[in-house]
Structure formats: structure tokens, C-alpha cells
Image: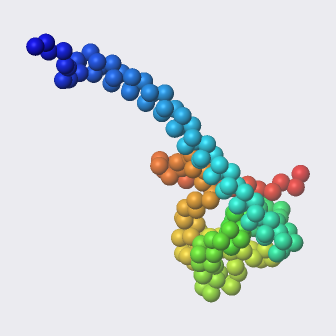
Amino acid sequence: MKRSQRGAFTLVELLVVITIIGILIALLLPAVQAAREAARRIQCSNHLKQIGLGAHNFQNQNNRFPPGYLGPIPQPQSAAFSGQAVCCLAFILPFMELDNVWEPMDADISDPANAGISLFDLAQVGNPYWAPTRPHAWRMAQTKIGTFICPSDTPYDKPIPAVMIYYYYDPS
């Protein structure tokens, strides 16, 4: 009787199969990463579209776009900063279905130190959102809103010390 049947792979055959599988995986990984980045890019574009729609919905309701600055114009060069310092993104929160962030921001309006001036009042200058008399506004200002962050960015992985820069209106 002749034995011509093989019952197992040789070491060389096994190594060749493992090498082929490794090459296939190495070719597949960049394609998977590219597909993930394309999905992130589409999500970021959608976020920008939502911000634009929120701004246009604000404009439709108020006949103007959100203000970029709340404070006196011209801002005195030598005086301390005055103004609520609420940016345009805070004004469009309710138009982006983020009422749960927007509504508590003005919860401290009844504090006597705030003199009934809303953070969103365009006609009067009130205390800024970081004032001790506005703890609700400060807490809401710390809220991380996913729509304002591109998925490829990781701004909260490595905290950076905050730097505040004042922009002054220069009439000249």
C-alpha cells in the first residue's frame, strides 16, 4: 500500500497563506480609513449647513442676521471691556433645535445685579456671561455642542489654557 494522502499543511504553505492574508489586509486598511474620513467630511459639511440654516431662520424671524458683537460701538480703546460678549452662534441655538442650551443662558436675568438685562439684548449693555451674577450662562457656555465641532477635530482631547482676546472697534 502506498501512502499518498496528506493530512496537514506544511510550515511553508502556512506561512505563504498568512503572508497573502497580511498583504490583503494591508491593501484594505487605507481604503477603510479613506471611507471613514469621507464620512467625517460629509458630517462636517452637514454641520456647516445646519449652522447656515439656523442663521437664515434667525434672519427670517428677525429681518437681520445675528449680531457678531454685543457692546457699545465704538468700543473705547482704553476702557475695560463692556458688553455681554455673546457671539452669533448663541443667537442661532433655538433655530438649530438646541433650546435646551439656549433657554438656561438667560435664567439669571432676574438677579438684581443684572438689572433685568438679557444676554441677548441688543439695545442695552449688561453683564457678560462669565460674570458671577450669571452662573447659568457660564455653565451653558461650557457645553460642548457637537454641531460646532468637525468630527475630524479633537479639540477636547488636549485642553489648552484659555486666552481671551478683546477686539476693539476702531473707527479710523
- Determine the residue positioned at 83% across, 74% down: 62
Residue 2 in view, yes or no: yes
Dividing the picture into quarters, in which one does residue 118 lie?
A: bottom right
Give the residue at x 54% y 34%: 31
Residue at screen point 23% across, 21% down? 9
Q: Is residue 99 above or below residue 45?
A: below
When the figure is inspected, residue 41 is found, relative to residue 30, above or below; the finding is below
Residue 105 visible in image: no
Q: In the image as oriented, which residue stretches furthest toward the right? A: 172
Q: Is residue 114 left or right of residue 24?
A: right
Q: Tag count in the figure?
A: 0
* Residue 93 appears left or right of 156: right
Of 37 and 118, nearer the camera is 37
Q: Considering depth in this image, is 170 or 96 the residue closer to the camera?
A: 96
**In the rendered view, does 97 fall on the left or right side of 161?**
right
Nearest the eye: 57 or 80? 57
Please state the horizontal and vertical placement of residue 20, each as a whole percent of the image: 39, 23
**In the rendered image, the vertical position of residue 98 relative to residue 168, given as above or below:** below
Q: Residue furthest top?
A: 2
Occupied quadrant, residue 53? bottom right
Question: Quarter of the image containing the N terminus?
Answer: top left
Q: Is residue 57 above or below residue 155?
A: below
User: Which residue is painted at 69% across and 85% down in the image?
Assistant: 116
Return the x and y of residue 7 as percentages of the image width and height: 18, 23
List x then y, in percent, for residue 114.
65, 81
